[in-house]
Image (cartoon, rainbow, N blue to C red):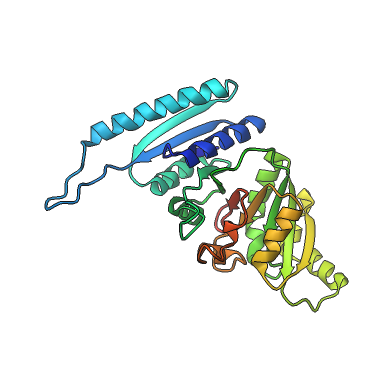
Amino acid sequence: IIAATDFSDAAKNALHYACRLAESNNVSLRVIHSFMIPVSFNENPMPVMPLEDGKELAEQRMSSLIQEIQEAYPNLFVTSQVSYGDIVDYLQEVVAEERPLLVVLGNDGADDDLMWLGSNVVSAMRHVKVPVLGVPASYQYRPVKKICYACDFKNNDDMIIAEDFKHLLGTTNAQLHILYIDKDSNESSEEQQLNIHTSPLHEALKAVDPVYHFVEKDSIDKGVEEFITANDMDWLVVVPHRHSLLESIFKKSHTKSLVKKVHIPLLALHEHHS
């Protein structure tokens, strides 16, 4: 597992979540930080400190953080890396080399932001081509037992993420719950079951034996929100691409966004990830 940190409270909370997750699933953890040098805004913009000073400061903070982590989780194998540049660019480089199980980030969006998800989390979810888990700032770790994926059985692209599901479920031993929300259902329960058992996603996921749910609701957001609360889900899966039912959560204002109401970790899978 890779955990990215900017040393904020939200990132620290997500790091502890990643530590517990790695520990409970017997995998190693790599903590990464990418720093930028601020530039003064005056007539002749200049970096506020030399690059080497910035690197030394970042490495000192990382060293202190890793010592704290190793004391708190003595049985966990932890490594760290510090780099200069944009964190999402750095994540893309690291995952291309290491192919981690997933990347964990803390949500750095405040409650009064336009988006519940911070900009780095959204960007990583869109562009880092391994599973990316965004952890809410106040969310405390608990074993991952139930993962919810809201999908459209008529969308053949869903089967492309099946291998990610198999890998994650094989590691966490969680149960996958696949949710289909129909705004205007004209299908009988028999027709719904037929749609399930003839879908490419069902064929691809037979080995992990997911539980299927049908919910009639005018609002997809409301249906997902109510389902994950009523059924005590641990993660909510999104696939940030143009065909996704939940692509709208990356666009809506904070008053309507689903993720403003869903305070569980959000896992992004990618249709191009193999």
User: Residue 149: x and y, percent?
Assistant: 68, 57
Question: Is any part of residue 4 visible from this angle?
Answer: no
Question: Image quadrant for the N terminus?
Answer: top right
Q: Residue placed at 70% from the left, 41% from the top?
A: 170
Above or below, comparing residue 58 to residue 138 in the picture: above
User: Residue 118: x and y, percent?
Assistant: 46, 52
Question: Is any part of residue 23 visible from this angle?
Answer: yes
Q: Nearer the viewer, residue 102 or 113?
A: 113
Q: Nearer the viewer, residue 214 or 206?
A: 214
Q: Kindly give the residue lying farthest to the front in the view shown.
A: 112
Res 21 quadrant in image: top right
172 left or right of 41?
A: right
Above or below, comparing residue 3 to residue 255 in the picture: above
User: Residue 27: x and y, percent?
Assistant: 60, 32
181 left or right of 244?
A: right
Q: Residue placed at 72% from the left, 67% from the top?
A: 181
Q: Kindly give the residue lying farthest to the left in the view shown.
A: 43
226 left or right of 37?
A: right
**How many marks on residues?**
0
Q: Residue placed at 53% from the left, 20% from the top?
A: 71
Q: Residue placed at 39% from the left, 48% from the top?
A: 89
User: Residue 257: x and y, percent?
Assistant: 56, 63
